[in-house]
């Protein structure tokens, strides 16, 4: 098979895999893994010589680490430090310590059954400590759980896991040194990493800002994008030259750029490269998996799937409970983080390259990690149902929340339900109060809810994407529902629930732009308000007024533009003389 035919095969398989996952509402990463298994040398054998693709997949890891570094935010770390350096730290450290200790103990007690060097045990423990950021974040975003109590804890743990990858990338290559040179190798690896990162972070930030500003002044899009690629791959090469990993240099490059004002532009430029090459990485991971191992050693693979998942679930749930969370929040946090993760594959691949993973262990461990990630969407979808069965206190807590919501709205009629109480929801509530129009807002951020309640706002903690919450705040008695989320997927969920159970209640939806305007209208939205359009109209209003256009003419022009876009405003006659009393 020629290089062109192989490339076309990968692209076709990737497209079909992603389309299938989108159809089933699963993360695209699972599609890439399945595609790799199907076309790999151990199944249909379409791709036998994949050395070139493996090199491209290494760049996928590089760009993954670059994006993680780009998202590295000191303010986010400070805001979530309790969950990141508390729950996240103990989860990673205890997982590595317990798994390594148990593996070494089993190797001593049953060498023929479990024989494993401590270096191998440590490598596998590091891989096991990771959870899937891509899958979990995507599913929580779709389910409107990022701001929930368990969502914050999950995010904190995932953030620390991302940071923990960096020392592991330094440690694992050094573990391959001979026993008498091991401590020396570890010392020099740590010293080189410390010196290199210190040099880059002390003088590198000012140089990076100066260099990016110099390139941006050329005002050439392709030059800026090429420069980002040069910085990412150049620093990755520099760390590899120092005897460290490519991924470490990419992470540092992302950190340096994240401290400049060009962060968001770089994110937009690098995203296509990141997604495509990361997809290739997961295809090659799937190609490494020999499905015959699962068939021949299904008992061992099943053991490697169930025991690590159960162990991580119990450990994380226990640590979360010890941190002061309720039983329901603890169980949900454990369920969401029990699976393997993409960085686990990175560490497993690095261990294999350094001859730390024996061949008879590589495929069973790889198969177990792939299978655990494949079942994750189904675990998360059923998590709430399971937690309510396992925890009587969680059922009581949810019942109490619904009761509190119902008490707030029991005597309220013709009110407006505001879904989301951020800046947009708060401004709407202020206007409603000036007109003595009753309202009730739902929000998932408990701190925001408490602050709003302290100011006397009609806000309650609740998930607008759950039918129970909408019904508890009097959906059927409401005069309107306003959805303030910028996430369209979340807005579609709330809209679907509102139109299915209270079709007579009008729904107004806020969006960032007008790309999905027709879809929202087809789904039953009474009106869709795109922020970009309103922002452009306000800019036009100020600009025309500043250049001397009479204000009455400006108002007529802006009103005409609004009438073209908003159905409700067409019923209003702009030439009407009277004023509302």
Image (tube, rainbow, N blue to C red):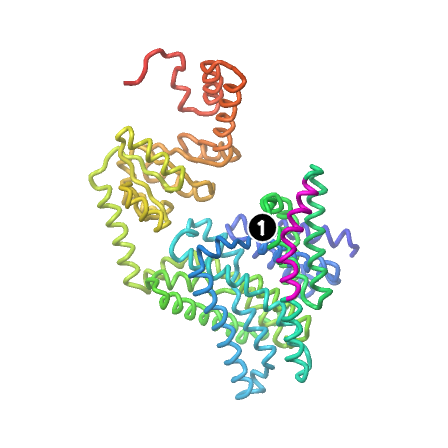
Residue 114 placed where, x, y %?
56, 82
Front residue (pair 277, 49): 277
Answer yes or no: is residue 359 visible: no
Front residue (pair 412, 466): 412
Q: Does the magenta stretch include residue 420?
A: no
Q: Which residue lies furthest to the right in this view?
A: 2
Report whether 258 appears left or right of 449: right
The residue segment tinted magenta is 195-216
Q: In this rendering, is residue 132 above or below 421?
A: below
Residue that appears at 27% across and 18% down: 581
Asked where in the image residue 481 lies, by quadrant, the reply is top left
Asked where in the image residue 248 lies, by quadrant, the reply is bottom right
In the picture of the structure, the residue carrying the numbered disc 1 is 259
Q: Residues within 10 Å of mark 1 (few under 14, many from 20)?
A: some
Residue 465 placed where, x, y %?
38, 46
Q: In this rendering, is residue 13 above or below 223?
A: below
Report whether 155 appears left or right of 205: left
Front residue (pair 268, 292): 268
């Amino acid at each position: 098979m020629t290089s062109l035919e192989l490339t076309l095969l990968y692209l076709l398989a990737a497209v079909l895999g992603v389309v299938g996952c989108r159809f089933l509402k699963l993360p695209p990463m699972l599609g890439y893994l399945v595609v790799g298994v199907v076309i790999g040398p151990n199944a249909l054998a379409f791709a036998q010589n994949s050395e070139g693709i493996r090199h491209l997949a290494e760049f996928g890891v590089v760009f993954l680490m670059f994006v993680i570094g780009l998202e590295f935010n000191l303010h986010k770390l400070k805001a979530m430090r309790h969950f990141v350096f508390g729950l996240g730290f103990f989860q990673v450290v205890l997982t590595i310590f317990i798994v390594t200790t148990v593996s070494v103990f089993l190797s001593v007690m049953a060498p023929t059954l479990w024989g494993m060097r401590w270096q191998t045990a440590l490598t596998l423990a590091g891989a096991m400590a990771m959870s899937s950021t891509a899958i979990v974040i995507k599913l929580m975003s779709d389910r409107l759980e990022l701001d929930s109590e368990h969502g914050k804890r999950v995010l904190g743990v995932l953030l620390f896991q991302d940071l923990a990858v960096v020392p592991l990338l330094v440690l694992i290559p050094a573990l391959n040194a001979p026993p008498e040179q091991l401590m020396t190798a570890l010392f020099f690896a740590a010293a080189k990493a410390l010196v290199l990162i210190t040099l880059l972070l002390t003088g590198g930030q000012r140089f990076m800002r100066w260099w990016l500003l110099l390139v941006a002044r050329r005002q050439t899009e392709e030059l800026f994008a090429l420069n980002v690629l040069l910085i990412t791959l150049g620093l990755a090469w520099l760390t590899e030259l120092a005897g460290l990993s490519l991924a470490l240099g990419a992470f540092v490059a992302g950190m340096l750029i994240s401290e400049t004002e060009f962060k968001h532009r770089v994110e937009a430029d690098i995203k296509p490269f990141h997604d495509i090459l990361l997809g290739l990485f997961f295809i090659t991971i799937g190609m490494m998996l020999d499905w015959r191992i699962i068939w021949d050693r299904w008992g061992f693979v099943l053991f490697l799937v169930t025991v690590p998942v159960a162990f991580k679930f119990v450990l994380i749930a226990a640590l979360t409970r010890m941190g002061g969370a309720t039983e329901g929040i603890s169980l949900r946090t454990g369920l969401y983080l029990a699976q393997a993760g993409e960085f686990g594959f990175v560490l497993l691949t690095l261990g294999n390259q350094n001859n730390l993973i024996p061949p008879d262990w590589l495929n069973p461990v790889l198969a177990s990690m792939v299978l655990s990630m494949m079942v994750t969407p189904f675990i998360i979808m059923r998590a709430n149902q399971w937690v309510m069965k396992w925890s009587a206190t969680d059922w009581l807590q949810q019942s109490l929340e619904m009761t509190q919501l119902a008490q707030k709205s029991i005597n309220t009629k013709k009110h407006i339900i505001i879904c989301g109480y951020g800046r947009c929801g708060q401004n709407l509530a202020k206007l409603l109060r000036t007109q003595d129009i009753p309202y009730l807002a739902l929000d998932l951020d408990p701190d925001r809810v408490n602050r709003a309640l302290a100011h006397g706002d009609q806000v309650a903690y609740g998930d607008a994407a759950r039918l129970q919450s909408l019904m508890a705040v009097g959906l059927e008695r409401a005069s309107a529902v306003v959805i303030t989320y910028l996430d369209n997927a979340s807005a579609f969920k709330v809209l679907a629930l509102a139109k299915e159970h209270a079709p007579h209640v009008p729904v107004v939806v806020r969006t960032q732009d007008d790309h999905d305007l027709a879809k929202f209208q087809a789904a039953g939205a009474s009106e869709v308000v795109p922020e970009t359009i309103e922002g452009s109209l306000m800019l036009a209003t100020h600009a025309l007024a500043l250049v001397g256009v009479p204000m009455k003419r400006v108002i007529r022009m802006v009103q005409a533009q609004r009438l073209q876009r908003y159905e409700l405003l067409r019923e209003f006659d702009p030439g009407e003389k009277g004023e509302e009393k």
